Image: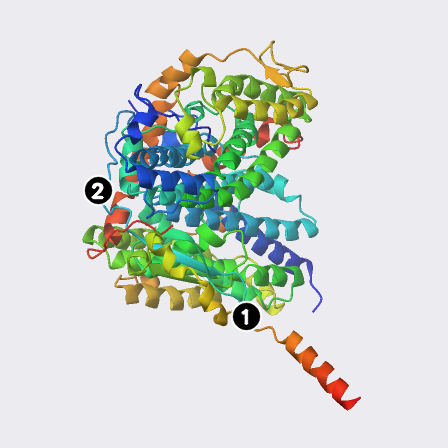
Amino acid sequence: MEFTEKHVMGLKDLLYKMADDLLILGHRNSEWTGLGPILEEDIAFSSMAQDKMGQSLALYEILHELGESDPDTVAFTRNDHQFHCSQLVELPIGEYDFSLVRHFFYDHADAIRFDMLADTVVEPLQMVAKKFRGEIKYHTMHANTWLKQLAQGSEEARLRMQSAINETFPFALGMFEPSEYEAELIEAGIFQGEEALKNQWLETVVPLLESYGYTVPDASTVTPIFGGRKGVHTEYLQPLLDEMTEVFRIDPAAEW
Amino acid sequence: MKIKSLDPRVTRSNIDEDTQEGILNPLDHFETYEVFEQRKRGIHHVHVGSVHAPSAEMAVVFAKEQYTRRGQCVNLWVVKTSDVFVTEYEDSDIFETTVNKKYREPDAYKVIDRINAFKERNAKQNA
Amino acid sequence: MYGNAYIENNGKELNSLTANEDPIKLAEFEARIAAGEKIEPHDWMPAEYRKQLVRMIEQHAHSEIIGALPEGTWITRAPGFRRKMALMAKVQDETGHGQLLYNAAETLGKSREDMTNDLITGKSKYSNVFNYPAKTWADSAVIAWLIDAGAIVNQLANSKGSYGPYCRALERICAEESFHLKYGHDNVVFLATGTPKQREMVQDALNRWWEPIMHFFGPSDKMSVHTETLMKWKVKMASNDDMRQTFLDMYVPKIWDLGLTLPDPNLRKNDETGKWEYTEPNWEVFKQVINGNGPCNKERLAVRRKAEENGRWVRQALLNKNAKYVAPLS
């Protein structure tokens, strides 16, 4: 079908929120590089942060082709209210329990989203979705292995992980904040929509966590923490951006 | 005194400059697994190093990034180091092949001269 | 990234330390090395060989782990996607190198836990250069280019040493370091050929890092401890001064090419001798820094202590009660 202006707006909105999520979470996770709990894990976690950065770049490049500014300008010159990331990804790294639970929740959503987009009518997005399949598969495998192992570990670890799951869950549900363009995205075959994504995500993560021995809050009784997709953010995002762009801002016209 | 670092990550971590924490106990970093990678289908797995890990599953997750993050790989094996039985270098003389084992080598079987001589003989007889 | 092992001799002649070794085994061992064969983990080896190798590989591993910190300073602030991803990959590699090297040292009988404890209690050393701060983004560029360049000079030499596991680790490491060197050079070139502000940043960083870089290869051989036996055993592969000369030969012209200056008025190549002449770096400062009084020693160790402590509950949770430690195979 012929895209109307609303379809294009919807597509851009989708690309922005995906790219912003990946950029901000990749940035957050890179804070562990060199400081992880065990050398081998330090390396693995850093690889995944790099993967996220690379995926966000690929999506900003599609946006650039759609007429938006170049990826560096988009990533390094906007203020927090111009970002469409979910609040989940901007929270500080905290301790490893939170970082792992966020990784688990986010990467399962990411995997399903990319899986859905492997059938999108938007060809460059379809290609990107297919290209990163392997990377993302490793990310969920990594997350599953960790959550499973820690559930079987010490009582302290199980409690820490359980409380991280409980606290993170409303933020995780916030990832599925609907956009203004859900109907357009669905009718045009661009994306199956946040509701479908959320349902598939719940069907994936809840049984997994339960099989490891955790309990999962009932999604129907939890109020998702929305806002991120509309530019409403926690107090943590602007300082993150100030830090990320500190050198870039010395001279945004310079080539670094 | 808390460290105020040039690295904002360090400043955020609120680290006591005189902290005495962090001392490790034996096995804190787990036992080791030996890692074997197969670069493409059809060739042997090759030993590439080891990882410290609490389980085989975790060893695979770790080995994948430590040993294959740049190279091509289609398959990984990990095996607990303590499960590998190894010969001693001291005993490496058991591998020496002596002359009388020549019959095991392909170059011990050179019959072309014999065939040629046979053909020549036949040719003469038939001539 | 690594400079050179700080060899300790407590005033003793190394030769006297082989006095208790079985002369036949020692002769076989030395003949094997002289023939260019590698020594492997379970081979017979003189106690002093083992001791010096553990010290050297361990210092090298610590240098990688601590070396991740000065550059890590800029990991959250790298300007633009290209630099951000590359710096993440580079710092990651340093951690990866630490992992490989600890494994190599473990084959000689010292556990990773013992090595880490010796690092965070200040008992064992690491390359001095990482006790200096990375004040600006340009410092991270200078480190990535020149410190890694120095490390490659050293590591290429060491990769031809006699201990199999160390050589194998270094082969992998050298391949990765060549990415670091390219990345670092690219980064410095962009700054040096960029805006006046960028140029000023990189010149300042170079001025700050020159003395630590000159210290990097260790004291002049004239002042060095007796290393003949270690050279014969192919533990130490090149003299400090030779490595410094190789480095100067390869990199000073490249620095000057960019119109950058170095803060040593005496630095020049003597065409007759073919050797570089320079102002002798202040070795008193070097000693001071090694002994814990550099600008960042305290911070570096405190950060590692905290990282180990933060990871404790994670590792404890995963600990397998039936685990049985044996040294990695090779």
Q: Chain of mark 2?
A: B
Q: Residue at x 51, y 63 (%)?
A: B74
Q: Which residue is mark 1?
A: B108
Q: Nearer the viewer, residue C80 or B123?
A: B123
| Point 21% across, 42% down: residue | B25
Please, is residue C162 above or below residue A128 in the view? above
Location of residue C239 in the rendering, given as x and y in whole percent from the top left corner: 49, 25
- Which residue is disc 2 drawn over? B25
Pick the front one: C199 or C162: C162
Q: Residues within 10 Å of mark 1 (few under 14, many from 20)?
A: few
- The answer to whether residue A234 is visible is no
Q: Seen in the image, is B70 located left or right of residue C327?
A: right
Q: What's the residue type where badge 2 is placed?
A: Asn
Mark 2–mark 1 distance (CA, rounded to whole Å)? 58 Å
At which x and y percent is residue A43?
Answer: 43, 47
Q: Chain of mark 1?
A: B
Residue C262, quarter of picture:
top right
**Amino acid beneath label 1:** Ala
Q: Is residue B27 left or right of residue C55?
A: left
Instruction: Decide if residue A163 is in sight here.
Output: yes
Look at discs 2 and 1 and give the one toward the viewer: 1
Q: Secondary structure at mark 2?
A: loop
The image quadrant of residue B72 is bottom right
Residue located at (40% from left, 38% from top) = C30
Q: Is residue C141 above or below residue B80?
A: above
How crowded pointer 2 is (Cα within 10 Å; few <14, some 14-19, many 20+) is rated as few
- Dot 1 falls on a residue whose secondary structure is helix
